[in-house]
Amino acid sequence: MYEKMLILKFPRTNVQEPIVCNLAKNFDLTFTILNAAISPRKEGQMVLQLSGSPHNFDEGVRYLRGRGIIVSNAGEEIRRNDEKCVHCGSCTAVCPTGALSIERPEMLVVFDQEKCSICKLCVSVCPPHAMELRPAENGETQPE
């Protein structure tokens, strides 16, 4: 099983097509939409976790590119600098995926990177700048 987080940028001509559903149906790929901003008659962007066999993954990416969609790796990730974090909870108020939460009764901020959609909202609201945007550690290049 091959899995990768991708960023898709849709031209306005494709935002109403069931492109991601076609990835599942035609290429036997599973997906999790982590973040999306797509409006009718406008360009859109989507962050998704895509998984399947390496062959089907490559075919699916070729299909996306053939539809005019710009496909790139999520080459960035959010990391928490534990030395800077004061557990104020500001980041938990803006996190749309629940990747940041407060553990009770200790009142400690917990970061589940698996749930993170890289929306970057936590980076801008963190008073001690403990939430940081960094290059992804996987070191992978763009899919073929």
Image (spheres, grey):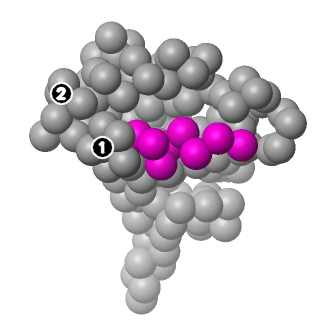
Q: Nearer the viewer, residue 64 or 26?
A: 26
**What residue sits right under mark 1 in the picture?**
29
Q: Quadrant of the C terminus?
A: top left
* Element type at mark 1: loop
- Please, is residue 112 above or below residue 125 in the view? below
> Residue 6: percent from the left, percent from the top?
44, 31
Give the quarter of the image for residue 37.
Answer: top right
- Residue occupying the far bottom of the picture: 105
Give the magenta part as a residue range.
16-24
CA–CA distance in space, label 1 to label 2? 10 Å
Mark 1 or mark 2, which has the lower sequence index? 1
Image height of 74 relative to 103, above or below: above
| Quadrant (top left, top right, bottom left, bottom right) of the N terminus | top left
**Which three-letter amino acid code belongs to the residue tagged 2?**
Pro
Say few, some or many: other residues with alpha carbon within 10 Å of mark 2 (under 14 / 14 to 19 / 20 or more): few
Please tell me whether the stretch drawn in magenta is mainly helix, strand or loop.
helix
Question: Measuring 16% from the left and 35% from the top, which residue is drawn there?
Answer: 53
Q: Which residue is mark 2?
A: 54
